[in-house]
Amino acid sequence: TEQDTLKVALLFVFVAIVGMGNMATMAIIQAKRAVFYKHRDASFFPTLVYTFSELIADLPVQILESLIVGCVVYFFVGFHTEAFGVFWCALLISIMMFVNVFKAIAANTSSGSAAQGVAMGIMALSFCFSGFLIAKTSIPDFFIWIYWLTP
């Protein structure tokens, strides 16, 4: 029905807003990069240990963000209450994906402006080929891999 279409559109916009909101993590990673390089070069810790510690340290914040924002949006839209767990898990995974992709972009670019440009390009591809703006059947065969890559 038309109401269901509006709910799906709202979810698409909601995930887009959450994704763009998490772009702020790139500035934090850019600021911490000099200290990380100094510690890594002095053999204070392996890179893998630093990466996992960042993941574990960010997890409570991401869980809290997904619970607060997820509850507001989920019940505001009027979804059935029994499916909230699935919605929350999908939201948490999306938030974790956006944060970690943006951290990877920030770690692999030379400046903040380059990171912003690459991130916006990836976000644009993700939005275009997610199946909402362009239907799966309308995507050319040589671009279908982008559809399966984006959440």
Image (spheres, rainbow, N blue to C red):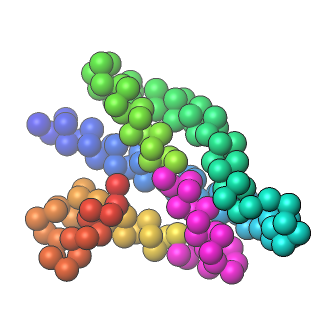
Asked whether, in this view, residue 117 is left or right of residue 38, the answer is left
Residue 140: say if magenta. Answer: no
Q: Residue at x 34, y 61 (%)?
A: 150
**Residue 90, how many percent across, how many down?**
39, 39
Instruction: Specify the quadrant that holds the C terminus.
Output: bottom left
Q: Nearer the viewer, residue 54 or 117?
A: 54
Q: Quadrant of residue 147?
A: bottom left
Q: Quadrant of residue 115?
A: bottom right
State which region is magenta: 97-118
Residue 108: say if magenta. Answer: yes
Q: Is residue 10 visible?
A: yes
Q: Nearer the viewer, residue 44 or 31?
A: 44
Q: Residue at x 52, y 69 (%)?
A: 119
138 shown above or below 99: below
**Residue 36, how many percent across, how many down?**
80, 65
**Residue 8, how many percent across, how many down?**
26, 43
